[in-house]
Image (cartoon, rainbow, N blue to C red):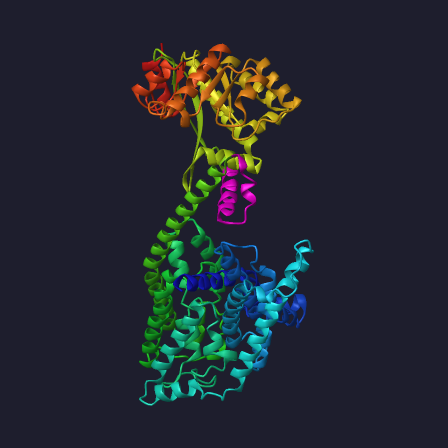
Amino acid sequence: MKHRMLLWIVATRNSFVSLLPLIFLRVTIDLLVNFPSTFFQGFMNDWLGDNWKAPLGQIGEATFNFYALALTAIISVQLVYRLNSNNATKSDAPTPLMVAISAAINFIIFISLLGYSAIAFSLEAMVLAIILGIATAELISWLTHKRLLDLLHLSVESDTAFYNAMRLTPTIVLVGVFFFLLAAFIAALPDFPSVYSVITHWAQKDGYGAWILSTLAVLVNQGLWFIGIHGGLAIDPNQQGPFFISASTVFSADWVSRPIFQNFVLIGGSGATLGLIIAILLTIRQGVQNKVAKISLIPSLFNINDILIYGLPIVLNPRYLIPFLMVPLLLMGISLLAFQSGFISVVNPSSVTWTTPPLLSAWLLTGSWYGVALQLLEIVISTLLYLPFVRKAELYRQQQERLAFEEATHTIINSGHAKQQIISRQDKVGMIARDLMYDLRQAIYHNELTVVYQPKHNRVGHIIGVEALVRWTHPRYGFVSPAMLVMLAEDSGDISQLDQWVFEQCCITKAKWNAMGHQDLTMAINISPLQLNDDALPFFLANCVAKYGLNPQDIELEITESSEISDSKQVEKILQEISDIGIHLAMDDFGMGYSSLLYMRRFKVNAIKIDGSITRDVLTNTTNADIIRTISNLGKAQQVSVVAEYVETIEQREALAEMGCDIFQGYYHSPPLKPEDCQVYFLSHCR
C-alpha cells in the first residue's frame, strides 16, 4: 500500500507540473490586470482602450474554469502510465487516452450531481479532481483484466483506435455508473453543520480570535497549497473568507485582518516564498532551483508564486514542508504582536491590492517607515529560515542528478550498437542526453574539451607514439565517459565537429613536439566510422596536416567500431584518398565490433588494436589467449602491427609479447598524460 500511495503522490505532483503552462498564462494575466501602477494602467487604457481587461479576464477565467477538469484527466493518465509500467503483462493494459476520457466523464457526473459546476475554480472541484483522477485510473486498471467485461471479443486485426475504444467501453460505462450512484448517495445525505461557524465561535470565546483564526488560516492555506490546491479557495474565496474581518474594519482582536495577512504574512505569495527565492539565489549558482527562482522572482515581487510552488516544486516536496508551514506562522506571530501592541497600524487598507510589491505595500498600508522596516525584517527572517532547507534540498537534488546521470550513462553505453536515437527518448535518459548534447556543442565551440595522450611502447620498452583521448568534465555532471561522449555526438550529428576539433588539437600538439625533436613519435587519433561518409574529410585532414607542417605519416587514424562502416564505394573512395595523403589507418577494438575481418579485406591498415576486454584477463582466460595468438598471427601474415590495450602489469605484458603483440599501451607504462606532462615523459623513455 505504501508503494501505491507513492505512485498516487508522484502522479498528482507531476500532473500539477504538467499544468504549468496554464499557471504561467494565468500569472501573466493577473500581473497585467492587477499591476499596481496608475501610470501602467493609464498607458494600457490609452493604448488598448478602456475595456482591455475584459478579454484578458475571460482568458484567465477560462484557465481557471477548466483547470480542475484538465487536472483529473492528467492525473488519471499519469497514474495509469505508472500502473502499466509496473504490470508485467501489458497486452491488456488500458490506453491512457481512454482512461483520461473516462476520468473527465466521471468528474462531470460526480461534481454535477453534488450541485457544483464542472467548470469552476473551487476547492470542491480541485479536491474531487484529485480523488476522481486516482480512483478512475485504479478502477479501470483493475477491471480491464476481468474477461467478463470484454463483451465484444474483437479481433486484433481491427483498427487499433477502434479496438481500444470498444474494448474499454464496457469498463468505462461500468465505472461511470459506479460514480453516478456514489455521487447520488452523497448528494442525498443531510447537510452537515458549518465547520467554519463552529471554529470561529470556539476561537473567539476567550478573546484570542485573531491569534487562533490566523493560525488556522495559515495552516489551512499552506496545507492546501502543499498538496497543490489553491489555499485561498478554502480560507478566503471571493474575498469573503469565514475567518476574515469585513473590508470596512481595519483590525480586530477576534478576526483575521486581510491586509495584514496578505502583506505581512504571505510576502511574495503563499509560504512567504520571497525569502525562499532570495535564499536560493544567495546559495545556488546553477541547476534547476536557481533557474526556477530566477523565473519566479518578478512574479513573486507581486505576490504571485504559482510558478515557484509547482515548478520547484514545493507541492508534495517533503524537503520544503516544514519551512513552508512554519515561516508564515512565525511571520503571523510577529505581525500580530506589532499591530496589537500599537507599534504600527493600518491607516489606508484600500490603497493596496494583493499584487502590490513588498515594502511599497507596507508604506502605503501603514504610512510609516516602521511598517517598511517590519516587512523588511520579515523578509530577512524568512530568508534565513529557508536557507538550511535550500541547502539540504540542493544536496538531495545533486545526489539524485548524479544517480540519474550514472543510470543514463549505463543505459546509453550498454545500448551499444543497437542504440536508437538516444536524444529522442522521452524518459529521463533522453532528457539527460539532450542536456548533454546542447552542452557538448557549447563545449566544442568554446574549447572546453581537453585531449590527453597515452604513450605506446614497443617490445624493448621504447616509446614509439601516443594515442589521443578526448576528455570532458561537465560543470554539473562531472566526468563524462568518452564512450558516452562519442555516442551522443554520433546520435546528435555533432560527430564531425567533435572529430575535427580533436584532430586539429592533436596536430597543434604534434607540431610543438616536433619542434622539440620528437618527430619520430606517431600520433594515433580516433575517428568515427560515420565520418567516412563525408566527402570533405580527406580535404580537411590534408589541409590540417599541411597547416601545421606535419608529415602525414606522423598521423595514424584509428577507426573506432562505435557503428558500422558503410559498405559503399563512397567509403572505399574516401579511405583510399586518406591513404594517398600518407596518413596511416588502424582498426580500433579489433574483434569486438562489426566484422573486423571483413574490414581488413576492404582497406589497408597499418595496425590492429586488440580490445581491452580480451587483454585484461589474458593470464587466466585461455580462450582470450588463443584469440590474441590468432590475431597476432594474422597481423604478422598481413605485415600489420598488433597493439595490446589495457596493459597493467609486467606479467601481462610479457605474456602478450610471447603471444605475438608488437606494441603495448596501458597503465603499466603510463596513464593518459597532459601535453606538458608528455614532454617530461618523452625525455626519459625515448630512444
Indicate the position of residue 125 as horizontal and vertical percent values: 53, 74
Indicate the position of residue 200 as horizontal and vertical percent values: 39, 86
Q: The C terminus appears in which quarter of the rendering?
A: top left
Indicate the position of residue 260 as horizontal and vertical percent values: 41, 76
Q: Which span of residues is magenta-colored?
A: 417-442
Residue 217 sits above or below residue 623 on the image: below
From the viewer's side, name the closer residue of 451 and 247: 451
**Residue 275 shows up from this direction:** yes
From the viewer's side, name the closer residue of 80 and 73: 80
Instruction: Residue 422: say if magenta.
Output: yes
From the viewer's side, name the closer residue of 650 and 401: 650
* Side of 501 where 458 appears, left or right: left
Residue 681 sits above or below residue 134 on the image: above
Indicate the position of residue 19 as horizontal and vertical percent values: 54, 62
Q: Quadrant of residue 102?
A: bottom right
* Side of 322 where 440 appears, left or right: right
The residue drawn where x is 56% and y is 15% is: 604
**Residue 119 shows up from this direction:** no
From the viewer's side, name the closer residue of 109 and 300: 109
The residue drawn where x is 53% and y is 58% is: 81
* Side of 302 where 149 appears, left or right: right
Number of callouts in the render?
0
Q: Quadrant of residue 564?
A: top right
Instruction: Residue 87: say if magenta.
Output: no
Determine the main secondary structure of the stretch shown in magenta.
helix
